[in-house]
Amino acid sequence: MILFLVIAVLLIGIGTTLLLLPFFRSPQLDQNNMAPQSQASLAILRESLTQLQTEHQSGLMTDEEFSKQKEELERRTIDEVVLDGPPTKSLASPAIKRLPVFLAIFIPLAVVGLYFIIGNPNAINPPANPQEQQILEMVKQLEGRLKTDPNNAQGWVFLARTYGALNRITDAKNAFDKALTLDPKNSDTLADLADLIAYENKTMNGQALDLINQSLQINPKNPKALALKGTAAFEKADYAAAIKNWELAIPNLGPNDAAFAQGLNASIAEAKTLLRPNAKADINPALTLSGKVSISPGLKGQVSPSDVVFIYAKAIDGPRLPLAIIKSTAAQLPITFSLSDEQSMSPQFKLSQFKEVSLTARVSKTGNAIPEKGDLIGVIPKLNLGEKNIQLIIQDVQP
């Protein structure tokens, strides 16, 4: 807004100056501005003066006679051309003197006033991140509607999904719980909640698997629940069960789920490779991250040997779920690590699929997979996949 005002003032000043400049120029007599009658009289008088000079030079007129007639000719020039000419408007008029002052005040005020009526002075400073603002406004509207219509189960589901997209995990779980209170047999809602719990706990087993099984009891063909159950089996290296559930999920996907189906097919192919006896996927060093995690001397006194250490890589622009994770204890610090697809949490999102990732090491006294206040953390915000000899230092406290 300040930049806009500065530019506007400069432009208004230049324009007003150009407009007022003629009022301050001294008026000049110009032969071209004379009336036609004055121009004709002046021509005749010039011709008479030329004739007088010729007669004087020829001796037909004495010096005294020439002087008298020349004076008479000059008097006629004043009378006929200057005094009898068209009146000239003078800037000495009080009204004309006030006009530049009036214009200098009126023009800027008129321009600014008109702009604020039909323009948008804030256009030079558009709102930051308009998409996020739109989502937040939508959340407020939906929250307001649910206050007046709290028995709308689908409204609570939609609000829960939106909270999840905003990483408001607790709010999302509460909204899912309200939806399930109103509609406890909704297979889709149970599968969505299972997905959220898996993200929070960083595992598809445990509480998430219980919800998945509840969803499949209601609808055995629920594609999302089948896909999630396959992922839970893959985590436990039960590749045959993973393949079975993924293959059951694909025929139940909708026409708009082509990308999802493609990801499941890729996961099935990987699981089939791992299912072969003594099979071990070859690890490409270019698709790994390796190095050492240590803790700064100033924080060592805050760590107990039994504290849990999480080391994980996440996509900079991609899924919120860690792409690969290692779990250890503080007693092992400094920890030499290597992250690859072998430590992937989900076959749909693997470390090898992303060129740039962030790397985090976190010490937790509770072992909670979700960061908590007081956790000790170290973060490298951007790394290229394939980097080696990474030195990650835990040196900050989670606020």
Image: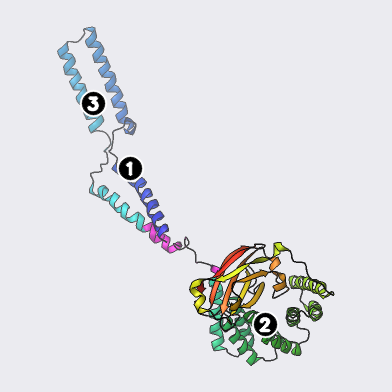
Which quadrant of the structure image shows residue 203? bottom right
Q: CA distance from mark 2 to mark 3?
A: 105 Å
On the picture, is 47 further left or further right than 147?
left
Q: Which residue is mark 1?
A: 22
* Front-most of residues 252 and 38: 252
Nearer to us of marks 2 and 3 is 2
Furthest-left residue in this view: 64
Q: Which residue is mark 3?
A: 77
Three-letter code for the amino acid on which mark 2 is drawn: Asp
| Residue 152 drawn at (x, y percent) | 61, 88
Q: CA distance from mark 1 to mark 2?
A: 75 Å
Which quadrant of the structure image shows residue 87? top left
* Front-most of residues 137 and 277: 277
**Is the residue marked by circle 3 packed among few (<14), some (14-19), or many (20+) residues within 10 Å?**
some
Q: Which residue is mark 2?
A: 192
Mark closest to the chain's N terminus, 3 or 1: 1
Furthest-top residue in this view: 59
| Residue 164 drawn at (x, y percent) | 60, 79
On the picture, is 53 further left or further right than 181?
left
Three-letter code for the amino acid on which mark 3 is drawn: Thr
Q: Quadrant of the N terminus?
A: bottom left
- In the image, which residues are magenta? 110-130
* Magenta-drawn stretch contains 115: yes
Q: Is residue 248 visible?
A: yes
Mark closest to the chain's N terminus, 2 or 3: 3
